């Protein structure tokens, strides 16, 4: 999807009537049954293991250890992926870079999911002026191209992984808000909730017990897609020098540093670039798997439905 | 047809959004540390005397209160004057006017190539869901999604230069109006790089929509009636799957208008993305503000058009 | 992007460019004529009756110099033809030479405007709009004889009124001229007749000739100043006249057939903005440009051995340095600063950050003042044991953290230098906390002295006073960010600048360099190279240490 594309918005998982709960393990089992999902799980487990290895200190070379006498060496038994201009081990840096990418994306996407879901549920449930205000805010943030918004925010906040994470959170929270608002709206309008309100059941209980479970499925799917977009954004910002700061390892920064070396030292580019690609593929496959596992149509047969594919279309209804 | 009330509401909303964008850009810019003086003079700004500095601040309009700065800019914009670049002293309108066509052309090319390739690939995949060609097409799309454009762009530039001794752009941008071939030879590579991600998204949307429609009752009926497969595909499936395809194309196109920064940087295209990137670095406030506003207007207009298109394609949405 | 180097980041851009002495002529044609010190050219006339001769006055001298910059007969005979295309990473940013700081702006406007005096490729003073000059009144009055028959673009004659108006414009604080601080000793300018301009100074100032040679001291058309049109369309007396500017794309200049130094060898000159250095290299391979200007060693390394262009490496006067803020503990302790200065292996920084391209340097990079780059340091650079001992002596053996600011985007090697310094100093327990900032916030932190250490690329000059007067004299304009006040440094600088006796200047500035290394306010590391990709069709291009492109005024194209 690359960073010039909009942050992806999952095709809505039909929330419809309460779908019944599934335990996470059951869900994973369903994903595993899908071949794509299985590759996704394997890739992500592998990536997480490599990331942990990268920061474990168990590797023969640390990600920021310089060995100037060994600079720009090709892959070998001693340096699996070769070395960079400072004689740093590219294998160690790639693994640590995967950790950096995962850390930024997980932190930012979770924050965005929590904030966005909260806002979306609030807007959908309360309606009225709350809905109006939140909706307008979302529209304003949507009118900025995502990468540009992230870029401006990082310029304002200063670079570093925490600020990159904040920028991605700001870009993504409105998307979660929009994803959460739809299902909330349909649940909030249901006879059941109206009755509950009349009976005086506390709002918090209604939200937690009845609204949230219905919002959960689309949010979970959105999270995996958001993660892959966040990984690309982090690496793009780092590529522009606005993300993770040297000497910390970051895949985007490694690619950026390698650009001028690629004709003489291909390994400086190939390994970090491959790591980004594998991370994004893994997350996408996992997301696709989750989506089909959560899709009620898998169990309840198909029926025509209106596409509400995107948030950027403006708020209908 | 298209309700007047609907149009009024959407238009009013769009204006409100644009005002919000203007406020946000203005504020974010003021939070970014540094100003045009330090950005353009570097450490030489330290050698300025008090009087010199004050006179520069006056020159850049930085000595006025923020509220005054904001409304005088907005007032200018409303009268069609986008302001003057602090750095080059040229009018923002002429700078944006030179850069915008490049970005728009890039976005249009990428969208055309991306949509064509994406729809073809998507229909191809959907024609036999779950079979090998579906799998292959989906894998290709997945790769398209996963390769970051900056990696692809950097590799394309390096490969073109070292293996073909050819470089698509050498700084002078050839406008479409002066030489179509000259222009296309510059634009085609960056457009192709952008089209990859674009096509991947379109492909996935096309595939899932087509698979869904192919299952619908009316398609089964048509099939039952013996309508040829090709005709079913073009007249029934594609037509009915077109709403999500138009949507994803429109949205991606809107984003491309402001999302070409990296590609313009790598391919040395003097488009709007690069203009924005450098003017943020230069703290060229009026130029950044006006360019972002232009991008936002483009974005909002594209969204309005997409909405409008929906109503034309799919009468059901008119009820909404 | 990290390969961009649109502005010479740190100090003295204004100073560096245009008034600098080249270390060695890359063309090799000028031989060893540097025995004659540049400063003596202007000043030997002070009180001697032989003034006229030694100032190389007047027309014979001027003609000789003129033909050196515009090697003439061949180019003058053949009608200039062809477009010479220069590719570089940045654009000009403003069109007023008195306000210009961006390297590209100075490079370009230097071809459109002239100054009173100029420097040749070796950095020696040569006549410009002034054909001769002499000092009197104990060095406090300088009289310039102006060149005859020079015309502005609209045909008006150049006169002393233009000189007076231009210098007064620089001195007027409302102009915010960059070069004002270097001319601040001027108290008044007289124009007794159209061919004579007289400067009155409050104190003798040997560096002023070099300050006047800068593009920042360009002579403008008095008419433009009155009309307030300076900065709109450049109007000068230089070898090229201004034609057009498409921001972020290109600047086009046309040959000035009436140029007093001889018409240029090409009909027009075009500067194109190619933001990435790799793209410039690719364009050179494709034959799209006649000259490519690079500064990133990793890109230049790929330019070796091409068939249709040559790679010219030109050592420059600017220097890579790590400034220490001696006002903040523990850097206020001399031994701590010395320990850091000792611990850094300069060659390792060059090898890792600049891919081996660069020379270890001391504080003074002026070719006229070459001294041992390490004399004065208490130990050999890279001697970790000695460094640790110094830290222990200072009671800082336990190590400490330093907030280190690094400017990103302005020159290619900054972040790499920071990373290597960090790795090196970690070995003596000193932790550099790197903060990478873009120009504007970096400059702000630097000016506020809000740092412990700052990795910088500072501009150099042929005149040591222009390099360090601003930092280490008591009333220098940048003493706060320089981080160290020292009476001794102040005295040495003032002494060197108030005399034109070359022996005294040599001794004084050698002592200055030694004291700077002893006091270790900063860690001087190395001088880098500029890289020029010169198409094989180009004749007569000379790279210069001051990064000026003046030789384009006489370059020609074949084929």
Image (cartoon, coloured by chain):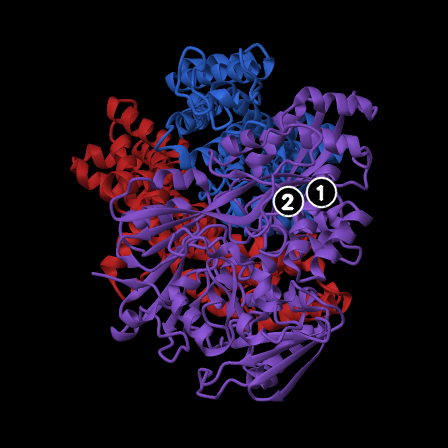
Chain colours: A blue, B red, C purple
Q: Nearer the viewer, residue B123 or C442?
A: C442
Determine whether C237 is above or below C374 in the image. below
- The residue labelled by disc 2 is C363
Q: Quadrant of residue C257?
A: bottom left
Chain letter of the residue carrying label 1: C
Determine whether B116 is above or below C539 in the image. above
Q: Earlier in the sequence, mark 2 or mark 1?
A: 2
Q: Are marks 2 and 1 in contact (CB under 8 Å)?
A: yes
Determine whether A73 is above or below B118 in the image. above
Chain letter of the residue carrying label 2: C
Residue C516's disc number: 1
Q: Position of residue C54 (x, y in %)?
A: 55, 70
In this view of the protein, can residue A11 be seen by the observer? no
Local secondary structure at mark 1: helix
In this image, B209 relative to C131: left or right?
left
Q: Nearer the viewer, residue B315 or C117?
A: C117
Quadrant position of the N terminus of chain A in the picture: top left
Q: Nearer the viewer, residue A235 or C194?
A: C194
Q: Position of residue C316 (x, y in %)?
A: 51, 49
Q: Position of residue C85 (x, y in %)?
A: 34, 60
Determine whether C155 is above or below B123 in the image. below
């Amino acid at each position: 999807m690359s960073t010039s594309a909009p942050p992806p918005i999952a095709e809505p998982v039909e929330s419809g009537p309460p779908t019944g709960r599934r335990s996470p393990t059951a869900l994973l089992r369903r994903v595993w049954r899908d071949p794509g999902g299985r590759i996704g799980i394997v890739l992500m487990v592998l990536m997480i293991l490599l990331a942990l290895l990268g920061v474990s200190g168990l590797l023969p070379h640390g990600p920021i250890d310089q060995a100037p006498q060994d600079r720009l060496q090709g892959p070998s038994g001693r340096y699996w992926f070769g070395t960079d201009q400072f004689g740093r081990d590219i294998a160690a840096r790639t693994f640590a870079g995967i950790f950096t990418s995962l850390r930024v994306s997980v932190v930012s996407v979770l924050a965005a999911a929590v904030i966005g879901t909260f806002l979306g549920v609030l807007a959908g449930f309360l309606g009225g002026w709350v809905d109006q205000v939140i909706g307008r805010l979302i529209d304003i943030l949507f009118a900025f191209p995502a990468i540009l918004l992230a870029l401006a925010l990082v310029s304002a906040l200063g670079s570093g992984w925490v600020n990159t994470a904040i920028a991605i959170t700001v870009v993504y929270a409105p998307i979660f808000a929009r994803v959460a608002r739809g299902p909330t709206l349909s649940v909030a309008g249901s006879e059941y909730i109206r009755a509950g309100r009349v009976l005086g059941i506390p709002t918090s209980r209604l939200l937690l017990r009845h609204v949230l479970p219905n919002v959960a499925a689309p949010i979970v799917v959105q999270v995996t897609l958001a993660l892959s977009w966040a990984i690309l954004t982090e690496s793009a910002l780092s590529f522009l020098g606005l993300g993770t700061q040297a000497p910390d390892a970051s895949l985007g920064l490694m690619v950026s540093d390698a650009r001028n070396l690629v004709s003489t030292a291909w390994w400086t580019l190939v390994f970090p670039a491959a790591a980004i690609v594998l991370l994004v593929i893994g997350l996408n496959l996992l997301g696709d798997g989750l989506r089909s596992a959560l899709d009620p149509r898998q169990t309840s047969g198909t029926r025509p439905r209106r596409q509400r594919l995107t948030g950027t279309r403006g708020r209908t209804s | 047809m298209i309700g007047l009330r609907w149009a009024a509401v959407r238009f009013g909303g769009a204006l409100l959004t644009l005002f919000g964008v203007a406020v946000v850009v203005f504020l974010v810019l003021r939070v970014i540390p540094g100003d045009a003086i330090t950005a353009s003079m570097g450490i030489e700004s330290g050698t300025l005397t008090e009087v010199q500095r004050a006179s520069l601040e006056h020159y850049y309009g930085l000595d006025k209160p923020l509220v005054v700065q904001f409304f005088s800019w907005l007032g200018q914009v409303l009268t069609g004057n986008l302001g003057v670049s602090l750095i080059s002293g040229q009018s923002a309108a002429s700078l944006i006017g030179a850069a915008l066509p490049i970005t728009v052309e890039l976005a249009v090319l990428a969208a055309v190539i991306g949509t064509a390739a994406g729809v073809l690939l998507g229909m191809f995949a959907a024609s036999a869901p779950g079979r090998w060609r579906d799998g292959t097409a989906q894998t290709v799309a997945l790769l398209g999604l996963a390769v970051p454009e900056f990696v692809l762009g950097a590799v394309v530039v390096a490969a073109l230069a070292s293996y073909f001794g050819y470089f698509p752009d050498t700084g002078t941008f050839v406008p479409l109006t002066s030489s179509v071939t000259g222009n296309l030879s510059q634009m085609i590579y960056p457009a192709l790089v952008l089209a990859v991600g674009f096509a991947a998204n379109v492909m996935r949307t096309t595939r899932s929509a087509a698979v869904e429609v192919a299952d619908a009752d009316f398609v089964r009926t048509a099939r039952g009636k013996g309508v040829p497969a090709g005709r079913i595909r073009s007249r029934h499936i594609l037509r009915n799957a077109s709403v999500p395809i138009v949507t994803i194309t429109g949205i991606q196109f809107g984003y491309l208008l402001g999302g070409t920064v990296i590609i313009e940087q790598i391919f040395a295209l003097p488009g709007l993305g690069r203009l924005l990137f450098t003017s943020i670095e230069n703290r060229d406030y009026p130029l950044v503000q006006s360019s972002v506003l232009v991008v936002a207007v483009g974005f909002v207009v594209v969204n309005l058009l997409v909405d409008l298109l929906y109503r034309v394609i799919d009468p059901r949405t008119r009820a909404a | 992007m990290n390969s961009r180097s649109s502005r010479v980041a740190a100090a003295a851009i204004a100073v560096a460019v245009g008034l600098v002495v080249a270390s060695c002529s890359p063309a090799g044609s000028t031989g060893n004529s540097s025995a004659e010190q540049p400063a003596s050219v202007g000043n030997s006339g002070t009180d001697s009756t032989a003034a006229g001769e030694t100032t190389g006055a007047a027309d014979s001298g001027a003609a000789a110099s003129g033909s050196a910059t515009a090697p003439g007969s061949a180019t003058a005979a053949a009608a200039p033809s062809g477009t010479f295309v220069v590719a570089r990473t940045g654009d000009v940013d403003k069109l007023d030479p008195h306000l210009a700081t961006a390297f590209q702006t100075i490079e370009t406007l230097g071809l459109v405007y002239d100054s009173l005096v100029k420097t040749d490729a070796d950095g020696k003073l040569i006549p410009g709009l002034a054909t001769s000059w002499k000092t009197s009144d104990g060095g406090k009055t300088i009289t310039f004889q102006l060149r005859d028959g020079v015309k502005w673009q609209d045909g008006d004659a150049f006169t002393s009124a233009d000189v007076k108006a231009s210098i007064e414009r620089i001195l007027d604080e409302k102009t915010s001229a960059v070069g004002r601080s270097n001319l601040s000793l001027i108290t008044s300018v007289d124009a007794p007749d159209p061919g004579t301009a007289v400067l009155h100074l409050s104190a003798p100032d040997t560096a002023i000739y070099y300050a006047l040679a800068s593009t920042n001291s360009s002579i403008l058309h008095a008419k433009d100043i009155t009309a307030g049109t300076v900065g709109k369309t450049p109007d000068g007396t230089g070898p090229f006249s201004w034609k057009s500017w498409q921001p972020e794309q290109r600047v086009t200049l046309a040959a000035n057939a009436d140029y007093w130094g001889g018409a240029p060898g090409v009909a027009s000159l075009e500067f194109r903005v190619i933001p990435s250095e790799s793209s410039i290299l690719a364009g050179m391979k494709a034959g799209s440009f006649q000259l490519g200007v690079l500064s990133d060693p990793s890109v230049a390394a790929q330019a070796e051995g091409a068939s249709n262009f040559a790679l010219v490496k030109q050592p420059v006067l600017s220097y890579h340095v790590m400034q220490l803020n001696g006002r903040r503990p523990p850097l206020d302790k001399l031994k701590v600063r010395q320990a850091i200065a000792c611990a850094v292996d300069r060659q390792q920084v060059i090898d890792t950050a600049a891919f081996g391209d660069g020379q270890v340097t001391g504080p003074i990079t002026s070719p006229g003042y070459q001294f041992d780059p390490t004399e004065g340091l208490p130990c050999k650079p890279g001697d970790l044991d000695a460094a640790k001992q110094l830290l222990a002596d200072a009671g800082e053996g336990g190590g400490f953290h330093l907030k280190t600011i690094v400017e990103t985007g302005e020159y290619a090697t900054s972040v790499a230098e920071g990373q290597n310094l960090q790795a090196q100093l970690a070995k003596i327990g000193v932790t550099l906390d790197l903060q990478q900032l873009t120009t504007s916030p970096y400059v702000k932190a630097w000016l506020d002295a809000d740092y412990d250490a700052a990795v910088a690329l500072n501009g150099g000059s042929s005149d040591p006073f222009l390099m360090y007067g601003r930092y280490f004299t008591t009333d220098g304009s940048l003493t706060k960010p320089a981080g160290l006040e020292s009476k001794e440094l102040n005295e040495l600088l003032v002494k060197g600048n108030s005399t034109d006796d070359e022996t005294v200047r040599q001794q004084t500035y050698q002592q200055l360099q030694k004291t700077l290394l002893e006091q270790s306010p900063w860690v001087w590391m190395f001088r880098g190279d500029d890289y020029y990709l010169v198409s094989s069709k180009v004749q007569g291009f000379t790279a210069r240490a001051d990064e000026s492109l003046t030789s384009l005024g006489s370059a020609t194209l074949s084929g």
